[in-house]
Image: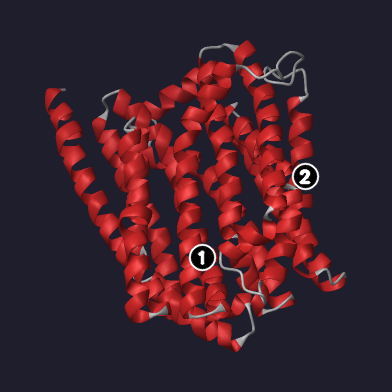
Amino acid sequence: MEQKGSHLALGTENIRKLLLQYAIPSVIAMTAASLYNIIDSIFIGQGVGALSISGLAITFPLMNLAAAFGSLVGVGASALLSLRLGQKDYSTANTILGNVLVLNLILGSLYTFVVLLFLDPILLFFGASPETLPYAHDFMLIITLGNVVTHMYFGLNALMRASGNPVRSMYATIFSVIINLILAPVFIFVFGWGIKGAALATVIAQTSMMLWQLLYFTDKSRSIHFRKGTFRLKSKIVRDSMSIGMAPFLMNVTASAIIILINQSLIRHGGDMAVGAYGIINRVAALFVMIVLGLNQGMQPIAGYNFGARQFDRVTSVLKLTIFLATGVVTLGFLLGEFFPHVVASIFTSDKELIEIAAPGLRIVMLVFPLVGFQMVASTFFQSIGMAGKAIFMSLTRQVLFLLPGLLIFPKFFGVKGVWYSMPAADTLSAAVAIYMLTVQYRKSILKQKSMV
């Protein structure tokens, strides 16, 4: 009854109250996840040195690829789990849980083996120099050795959220950040382990929470828990999970390819310090992007339910409110980037050369940042109302249609600044596409159907 009432509230409760209720746990979890990266960068930059930030930036594509394989399993399996729970098919739901554990173990192990076998050649291809390679190698060696744990941690967290426990899922994320926040400065500054200490702190934090998740799912009093016979892979579950998870997988792979191109261009036109500057800019921008992702996760069920129920005024209300909040969040990022770029950069490093490269870069990259919130909300809105193809197209327009050509053209004329210019140019063009697609869809679908009601 509670679950049914909860679903009914999506069509009757005050929109503002609903959005806050659904979005706040996601925003907190997303912000905490982003803080993982920011905390590591700050401690590494202040405790190890400017070149270590450049080395860390070289690892971004590999981190994105790990996330891509994690989402290939976790996103799809969590969607399947929600569907089976709605059908009260607890037997299949438990099999999904067991299959996710095995799939993450297999994919995580294969990824670890391949990356460790070719780690240095991969990092060199990504843009590492003789000066930054040792830092990138030391960090990724430990992160990759803990990759299976990372896959398990994110996969089980997604299933915990899908099984009706978003608050527990949020706690797992928050506590992993807290553990990392405590351990990283001890390992870096007290023990003198440098960038290896930062990586080790991350792995220990995720391992601690993964053990807690395993304990949670071994509790037989819960309807969803580990059972005998659920660990044998079922072809339909594997196939369906990977099919649903293919969209976020491809987006992460595309993001990795773009970051590789950015790093290579920065190395060619500005050297190691330019790569380090991008590492700082990327971490700062990601914080605000992750908050918007949390707002989008809160909007999704509200928009989807009311669109299906033909309550189009409520669909319009939640869309407008989410756009307003998302724009406010990214505008804060814009203000920080435009008015306090040196202050922001100096949080990560005390190296004057790196600050002088990062500060103007941050100002350029954040130039049209208020448009980013709208573009992200519009993309998620299409996904919410069942138009996954349009959502994927909009998600990829910035990176593939606009950013990629910009990265190939602008640096030839403007050097390092050309890399920075390509980002606001892509943001502007992708926002224009979002405005066009959302306007057309609104006139075609919502206004037309409202006139028929």
Q: Is residue 138 visible?
A: yes
Query: Is residue 202 shown above or below 420?
Result: above
Quarter assignment of residue 403: bottom left
Q: Is residue 340 visible?
A: no
In the foreground, 308 or 261:
261
Q: What's the amino acid at mark 2? A: Thr
Query: Is residue 341 shown above or below 18?
Result: below
Write the residue at 57% across / 20% down: 237
Secondary structure under badge 1?
Answer: helix
Quarter assignment of residue 309: top left
Query: Is residue 342 shown above or below 371?
Result: below
Write the residue at 65% across / 28% down: 100
Q: Position of residue 25 (x, y in %)?
A: 56, 43
- Crowd tier of the residue under label 2, counting other residues whose Cα lies within 10 Å: few below 14, some 14–19, many 20 or above: some
* Residue that label 2 marks: 207
- The disc placed on residue 244 is none
Q: Position of residue 329 (x, y in %)?
A: 43, 59
Q: Is residue 322 left or right of residue 310?
A: right
In the foreground, 279 or 118:
118
Write the residue at 67% across / 20% down: 224
Write the residue at 26% across / 59% down: 429
Q: What's the amino acid at mark 1? A: Asn
Mark 1 and mark 2: span between their CA atoms?
Answer: 26 Å
Residue at the outermost right position: 191
Q: Position of residue 447 (x, y in %)?
A: 15, 34
- The disc placed on residue 282 is 1
Q: Position of residue 17 (x, y in %)?
A: 43, 40
